[in-house]
Amino acid sequence: MLLWSGSVRRTGRAANTATILSRGEIALRVRLTRCYLGIQVVPARLMCAIIDNYNVYKMTYAPARHHVESFPPQVGAGSALLILGTVPSVRSLELGQSYGHRHNLFWPFMGEMFGAGPEWPYPERIARLKRRGIGIWDVLECCERRGSLDSAIVAGSEVANDIPQLLDLQPTISAIALNGGKARQAFRRHVLPRLSADMRARVTLLDLPSTSPANASIPRAIKRERWQVIADWLADGARA
């Protein structure tokens, strides 16, 4: 229960900003204020200050929520492997390049395995992957997100790309590598139920650790070792 004395009806700017704060957030800050000051009832003026100060903080520091859209698929004819991220980061969208953040390990890994590293211009990297039978895309076509983190994607805003149609148009794709836990989760939730029985039988799913710099809990060497599976898979397919 929210406990404060007097009215908290505001006028002008404060009334507009107060709507940013949810009832749950208000209740939490009231409880903290009561504990800190050792009081049972929060006066109306203090309650308004709690709301206004927190709203100023949110408007100043909290990342704005943006509508985010993925890039078109970069898939060549005869591709064997499709690598799926979640959706482009803010930096990727600014550059118009998948995995554009300079600390993302995707392109260094592609360089070590396939000669498509960040030292090459982006179009050349894409061309080199295509020559090796690798395509890249994202699980999500669009979503609402604050900042770049996958964890900041707004629940219920996810719309998946038409990956079943791509697999239908590219029948040579026989493996999908999922870059990170959110890509895996979104794929299994939004895409896998739409795949036909034939597609499920044809395509091998490879779950890989995220190459994002936000995934700092896994050492680079471990990530690189686990990403080696795509090179091994392609080599095995070439020998078959």
Image: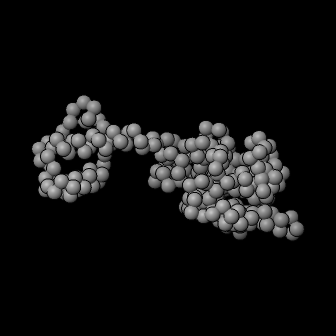
Residue 76: image location, x then y, percent: 79, 49
Q: Residue at x 13, y 53 (%)?
A: 41
Residue placed at 48% from the left, 46% from the top? 146
Left-right relation of 84 to 216 = right
Q: Residue at x 78, y 66 (%)?
A: 233
Q: Residue at x 29, y 35 (%)?
A: 16
Q: Is residue 15 above or below residue 227?
A: above
Identity of the residue furthest to the left in this view: 6
Q: Nearer the viewer, residue 61 or 17?
A: 61
Can I make out residue 36 in this image? yes
Picture quarter with the N terminus: bottom left
Q: Quadrant of residue 202?
A: bottom right
Instruction: State the residue in front, 59 or 222.
Output: 222
**x, y percent for residue 32:** 24, 55
Q: Nearer the viewer, residue 156 or 212?
A: 212
Residue 19 visible in the shown view: no
The image shows a total of numbered marks equal to 0
Please provide percent x and percent y for residue 114: 80, 55
Q: Residue furthest top?
A: 12
**Residue 173 placement, left or right of 71:** right
Furthest residue toward front: 37
Residue 47 image-quadrant placement: top left
The picture places residue 31, in percent across and down from the top left corner, at: 22, 56
Relative to 186, does residue 70 appear above or below in the rendering? above
Question: Viewed as shown, does residue 28 lie left or right of 152?
Answer: left
Q: Give left or right: position of 50 versus 199.
A: left
Q: Quadrant of the C terminus?
A: bottom right
Q: How is the image coloured?
A: one colour
User: Which residue is the extreme one toward the right?
Assistant: 239
